[in-house]
Image (cartoon, coloured by chain):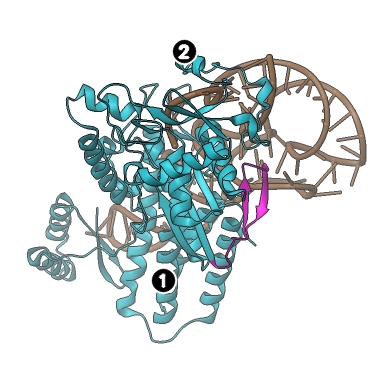
Amino acid sequence: MLQIYNTLTRQKEEFEPVTPGVVNMYVCGPTVYNYIHIGNARSAIAFDTIRRYLEYRGYKVNYVSNFTDVDDKMINAARENHTTVEAIAEKYIHAFMQDTAALNISKNVVHPRATENIPEIIDFVKNLEDQGYAYNVDGNVYYRARKFPSYGALPHIDVDQLEVGASQHVEKGEFAQKEDPIDFALWKKSKGDEISWDSPWGKGRPGWHIECSVMSMKYLGNTLDIHGGGEDLIFPHHENERAQSEARTHQTFVKYWMHNGFVTIGEDNEKMSKSLGNFVTVHDLLKRVDGQVIRLLMSTTHYRRPIQYSQASVQEASSNLKKLQTGFNNLTYRLHNAEAGSDPKVEQEVRQIIADFTDAMDDDFNVQNGIAAVYELVKFANMYSERDIVFQNSLQFIINTLTELSSIFGIKLEQSELKDEEIWDLIHERERARANKDFIRSDEIRESLKARGVILEDTPQGTRFRKE
RNA sequence: GGCGGUAUAGCCAAGUGGUAAGGCAGAGGUCUGCAAAACCUUCAUCGUCGGUUCGAAUCCGAUUACCGCCUCCA
């Protein structure tokens, strides 16, 4: 039984999607005014892993993640770079696709953009206005938050105790126009020559929250199974989405609200964020760290807990990735002299590990215990592949299982290949030298290949190689 | 000020009443021509104080520290 922690109820709940066998999930994507940092990547990775596990469990997953390609930050970035909002969006959406590909995030994602859904956004806002949930003040349209009875339920905030402006991020002028400080903008009047669209309220552009309501329901229906994002989105972003959407449809907007914890950095473990300026972009990190390492680093802490980013944590992830890859490589190497048939005890053991894995992941995606099961499998595989006699089917079963479980964490395991004939010649020459006990020559070859990134290891079954 | 989270070995991190999973790093060992890889052994009484209980990392109370949200944020 799969259980998911729901931010709304603050409890783990049994997972039952609206339509049996199908999961409609929406994950808030970035505002594309900059390269994504590893905090953004954490969110993308956490939900990609969740998605892959749901698919492993047999669900058909419809996954939508937006690009917010118009807002104040976009406009400012365009202005500072003397270019257009569209050009900024194109540049960083392209970078996003490259970065997430390097992190092996599934490409099977619908990526709608706010600017491609303006008519739908206007319709949505108009509907809220007609229902009395929204009001127009001089071309700015606001949502009447108190009219939505459960406003504050998702973040568990008592609206009357909200200390307005406590985060010191509110523009002072904005309050003057609103009926109530907690109201929020659905549609913003354009200032001067900013990017804008015609609307019933004059030229303007969408507010921050509206695009997610519109696009999620457009692609996934009125009730989403899962809506995810970083925990900083709980309030106001997701609460406002919920208020808008349920006011519009009078139906439950989301069954399971899921929020990931932050990536922290530095001695104080501060939240990494663009506004604090303490961020590391994925774009830069990929220049010196394998995407798979980042993927594993982000995959091995429970999604609701913070992850500390440091050199040490990267190093540890790197060691663990190597452990998986080497184990896989050694296992695959044994195939060449395995005997036909299978050992039922192996299958029994592996099935137990799979059960442990599934039990862990079913508990709100407990990846630490899930990955522990994978390490257990690797240990078992290492012991098995060193036996004198191994069976082909058993070996293949372990290989398939290891490949499948690792892929849920976005780790692609592959056997090293050597296409360079010269290297093969050297390997064969070394085998002859060893047979003649010419260890000087054989060590020389091993050293020279190591310098070229090819590690040779002698086993009772022959010389095994892997790429460093 | 309101709300929430976290504190377990050098580091990361499981574990919700019965005498502390796993990983990284370290130490010792086995295997090997030597290596490498792998395997084996070894390494903590759970922030502090008090309480409940036959028994608590796990429940209750208090306390300390750190982090986050309170309309920029994943």
Q: How busy is the neighbourhood of tag 2: few (under 14 within 10 Å), some, or many (20 plus)?
A: few
Q: Which chain is cyan?
A: A
Along the line of sight, which residue is nearer the eye, A330 or A119?
Answer: A119
**Residue position marked by numbered label 1 in the rendering:** A400
Q: Earlier in the sequence, mark 2 or mark 1?
A: 2
Q: Which mark is residue A138?
A: none
Residue in the image at 44% along x and 44% along y: A123
- Judged left or right of residue A62, residue A97 is left
Residue in the image at 50% along x and 34% along y: A237
- A343 is higher (above) or lower (below) than B14: below
Q: Which mark is residue A172?
A: 2
> What span is in magenta?
A2-21
> Which tint is chain B?
brown
User: What is the three-letter code of the residue carrying label 2?
Assistant: Lys
Instruction: Check the residue under mark 1 and report the chain it is in.
Output: A
Q: Is residue A321 visible?
A: yes
Q: Is residue A374 magenta?
A: no
Along the line of sight, which residue is nearer the eye, A100 or A172?
Answer: A172
Total of numbered circles in the picture?
Answer: 2
| Element under disc 2 | helix
